[in-house]
Amino acid sequence: MSLFGRRKKKKLEQQALEQQVLEQQAAKKVAEDKNNAAASSAEKVSQLNPDEITTQDAEEVDRYNRGLEKSRRTFGQKLTALFTNFSGVDDDFYDDLEETLIGADVGFETAVQISDEVREDIETNHVTDQKQIANLIVAKLVSLYTRNGTEEDNHLVFATEGPSVFLFVGVNGVGKTTSIGKLASRFKKRGKKVLLAACDTFRAGAIEQLQEWGKRDGVTVVAGPEKSDPAAIVFDAVQKAKKENYDLVLVDTAGRLQNKVNLMKELDKMRRVITREIPHAPQEILLVLDATTGQNAMNQAKVFQETTDVTGIILTKLDGTAKGGIVLAIRNQLHLSVKYVGLGEQVDDLSPFSPKEFVDGLFSGFLETNK
Ligand SMILES: Nc1nc2c(ncn2[C@@H]2O[C@H](COP(=O)(O)OP(=O)(O)OP(=O)(O)O)[C@@H](O)[C@H]2O)c(=O)[nH]1
């Protein structure tokens, strides 16, 4: 067996183990989700009118398209290159397909899965035509979003009554504070009364950074001294939100990934405080990931999933990377929805994620050349 073959076998065994753990977690989550769904109908938790979030004006669509340009172009080029010297489907072709997908940051696991499925379809249906094969690959990638007949639901969940609380988690530098600032501005513009809670008391300067955003957006920030207990600050924030009829509390947290136990304890304590004050909150625990870090972001996500019940992803800095394939890896390996994408450093550069538009867009150039 070749070195690549042995490496692949080892990775596949490892992957099978990881898959087992993920499936157990997914089954647990399904059971929990069922309980939560039953509880939430009684609790009257609902989604905000989705139109309010997903309606994009022309400017926003334009920004979205520009922000994703790098990913689209590169993905298309890589797939086109795969077919440049196409001489038929053999083992080398499938190895190249896997390498191409891994290079686009789709992730090893997803790349092998796609390649295996493409191989099965080609062999079963005796497909030899290059264009048909190209279309088959794209169809497989697109189908990652519609597996099991479930359309991705990427809407944020809001309480129908009283304040909604969103907790933002993620390691330092991924764009947590910036995303909170951008979302605060977005929801304020839509008439929501927004409160920010500066619970990253760990990193020097984090509180000031959030206060800067507060000033810029014209929204109030609840803060305490550096190194103080984040749970005490979140308590003050939810109390204030209830008393003063805020619609939304956005909570910044510290992301000390290197100390998982402390991180878990801290997030747990904050959650308990929030839920004690507002029984069905937090409605969202949003993990912020930096798209430019590719597979590193996937590893961070796995740790955060083990640490807390993440409800969705905000994927930042998509404008700065050609590694948009990570969106597919997140969906396929983590079973989480990307809810918003960061497309630049300006206040308006954060858009609701539209999976269909994104996935279609990724491959439009490639399909054009393979018509
Ligand atoms: N190009 C681009 N830059 C972004 C985006 N989101 C955030 N940034 C930049 O990324 C840098 C880090 O963002 P922060 O918001 O400070 O990151 P953070 O996760 O809050 O970091 P800590 O406060 O250290 O936890 C800043 O320079 C932001 O302007 C994005 O979508 N696109």
Image: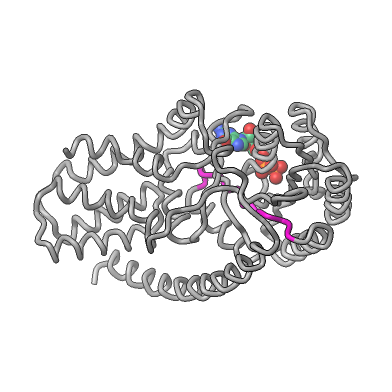
Residue at the image position 46 percent from the left and 42 percent from the top: 354
Read off the magenta span: 280-293
Name the quarter where the C terminus is drawn.
top left
- Quick one: quadrant of the N terminus? bottom left
Residue closest to the far top: 59
Q: Quadrant of ligand 1?
A: top right
At x 39% / y 44%, what residue is drawn? 356
Percent coordinates x, y for residue 181 in the rendering:
70, 35
Relative placement, left or right, of 293 versus 173 is left
The residue shown at (58%, 67%) is 33
Query: How many numbered discs?
Result: 0
Q: Position of residue 24 (x, y in %)?
A: 51, 76
Image quadrant where residue 204 sits = top right
Give coordinates of residue 194: x percent, y percent. Answer: 76, 38
Q: How is the image coloured?
A: one colour
Q: Is residue 25 left or right of residue 107?
A: right
Identify the residue shown where x is 54% and y is 36%.
351
Front-most of residues 219 and 327? 219
Where is residue 117 shown, x and y percent of the image?
26, 63
Q: Is residue 284 magenta?
A: yes
Q: Is residue 206 magenta?
A: no
Is 336 left or right of 99, judged from the image as shown? right
Tell me: 113 left or right of 27.
left
